[in-house]
Amino acid sequence: MLHGKRARQAARTAGGDVEAVLNIGRSPDIDPFLVSTLLSVRLQLHPHLKIELSSRLSSDLVHDVLAGSLDLAMVIDALESPLLSMLEISRSPFYITMPEHDPLAKRDSLTLEAMDGREWVLFERQEHPQLYDSILRTAVERQIVPTNVHHVMTAEEAFLFITQGAVAFLTKSGALRLTKTNSKRFACGVSIRPLQESTLSLQTFLVSRADNDSKLASELVRAFVRKLSLFPGAKQLTLPLTA
């Protein structure tokens, strides 16, 4: 199936003005800034390069990279492997979302201790297994006990629980989607604060197979990293942290 797909891509390339195709995957939780920056990269030696972008869970993306169906992938919470080359391209905190008039909204940032005895909204474990386990393990070690834990697949699903008094752990991308999807209700009902826990930060990696010797992929990665260096982290994504 993989060879058939690549053959079809090669045929389309030969029939048009596209000289090469790179298949790149991304997690839906990736900062939109990283995706737009990658897509804006232009290579002088490959002016007609085409990027085929797909979106899946990080674990599925790593599997596809190892299987060879993806040249590169931007993933969160990736396990180190001798079969992978991994480059960290971003690190950011979780963002805790709560009702506007919640006492926690008066703080500039939050810790896990501040959410002891509250209802939590967490992503499904299959999305980011290491991070999920780290959150619960840290809570147990510090004797922090939520009264209930709700699980969601998207930030939008968390909104109902938030309006009922729960606090939700969101990625920057998820928080941005929530504010856009619920823009009218957000303005009068929801606040977002960063979680200041260094051991629970979200690390984004650009991964490829360790034996990937593609000069085109390497050139794209170098150009992407150079372009990222032109933008300080503060420019990556602006969130309306005040209610």
Image (cartoon, rainbow, N blue to C red):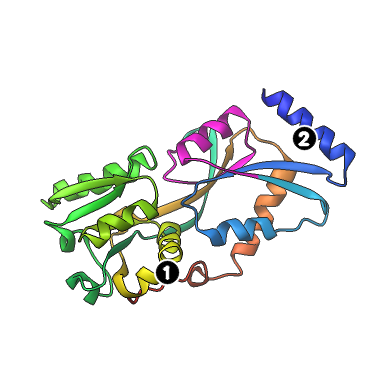
Amino acid type of the residue that numbered disc 1 sits on in the rendered structure: Ser
Q: Is residue 214 left or right of residue 103?
A: right
In terms of secondary structure, where does tag 1 sit? helix
The residue identified by callout 2 is 9
Task: Out of 237 and 141, give the one closest to the viewer.
Answer: 237
Query: Is 48 a magenta residue?
Result: no
The residue identified by callout 1 is 183
Mark 2 closeness class: few <14, some 14–19, many ≥20 residues within 10 Å: some
The number of numbered discs placed on residues in the rendered structure image is 2
Q: Quadrant of the N terminus?
A: top right
**Coordinates of residue 183 in the picture (x, y in percent):** 42, 69
**Coordinates of residue 55 in the picture (x, y in percent):** 55, 44
Q: Quadrant of the C terminus?
A: bottom left
Identify whether 5 is placed above or below 111.
Answer: above
Q: Is residue 91 left or right of residue 135?
A: right
Amino acid type of the residue that numbered disc 2 sits on in the rendered structure: Gln
Q: Determine which quarter of the picture holds residue 108.
A: bottom left
The residue segment tinted magenta is 53-80
Query: Is 65 a magenta residue?
Result: yes
**Coordinates of residue 236 in the picture (x, y in percent):** 51, 67
Kindly identify the residue that appears in the image at 65 percent across and 38 percent down.
71
Task: Out of 230 and 36, give the one closest to the viewer.
Answer: 36
C-alpha span from label 2 to label 1: 40 Å
